[in-house]
Image (cartoon, coloured by chain):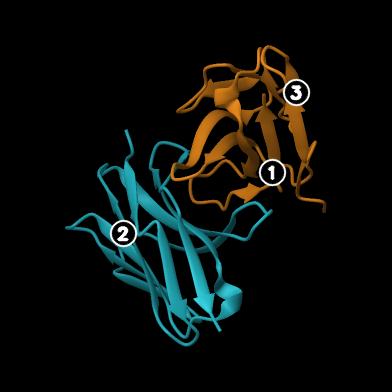
Amino acid sequence: QQQVKQSPQSLIVQKGGISIINCAYENTAFDYFPWYQQFPGKGPALLIAIRPDVSEKKEGRFTISFNKSAKQFSLHIMDSQPGDSATYFCAARGTSGSRLTFGEGTQLTVNP
Amino acid sequence: NAGVTQTPKFQVLKTGQSMTLQCAQDMNHEYMSWYRQDPGMGLRLIHYSVGAGITDQGEVPNGYNVSRSTTEDFPLRLLSAAPSQTSVYFCASSYLLARDTQYFGPGTRLTVL
């Protein structure tokens, strides 16, 4: 049972464009939502994270938008660059422990 | 700090063979975990540990064993390898609190023939 659903599976964006990746979750006990970035041949690394008491968090060109009532959250990458080409994973964690549930991943390609 | 290290980077096994994937961290993290990554399926939790001597099953534990004798090390054992275990395996660690960042190792690419 996939508790976190991520879309799209792949995304191609032109340099300077906006990349948008969406995630939806089912478990209302989730209360921490990180995004991880993974480059080829490397392990995932934390990019940005949000808690449900805020609707948006911005760090540089990366923004998480959070809709608690819809149980959805999304990653926006402004002014996308070829160096942003990577696989992005959303995730969610509940209050009872440190276990992360990951989405399926989105392979982002930013063309120059 | 070396962070989270994993060995080997690549491994090819024949069906039925056993092996141990090694994971070590030097950040004094209490929480360690193993994930497998398969195309279109994200990262799925295999086993995890909240401290030395304590382990528990994750989402896909069948065919794998773990132990945690020290804070630093968390090896993953494949008892009798099957082609379905062909995957990329990642070890991760974090401080125990639920809000802490998980740090991932570089991964082990395993092929079972």
Name the amino acid, label 3: Thr
Query: Callout 2: residue from which chain?
Result: A
Q: Which is more N-terminal, label 3 or label 1? A: 3
Q: Which chain is orange?
A: B
Is residue B72 at least partly visible in the picture? no
How many marks the image carries: the answer is 3
Name the amino acid, label 2: Pro
| Residue at numbered disc 2 | A52
Q: CA distance from mark 2 to mark 1?
A: 31 Å
Q: Nearer the viewer, mark 2 or mark 1?
A: 1
Q: Please, what secondary structure does the residue beneath circle 2 have? A: loop
Q: Quadrant of residue B13?
A: top right
Identify the colour of chain A in the image: cyan
Name the amino acid, label 1: Gly
The percent position of residue B91, horizontal first and vertical second, equals: 65, 39
| Residue at numbered disc 1 | B107
Query: Callout 3: residue from which chain?
Result: B
Q: CA distance from mark 3 to mark 2?
A: 39 Å
Q: Please, what secondary structure does the residue beneath circle 1 have? A: loop
Query: Callout 1: residue from which chain?
Result: B
Q: Which mark is residue B20?
A: 3
Answer with left or right where residue B5 lies relative to residue A81: right
- Label 1 neighbourhood size at 10 Å, few (<14), some (14-19), many (20+)? many
Q: Nearer the viewer, residue B14 or A72?
A: B14
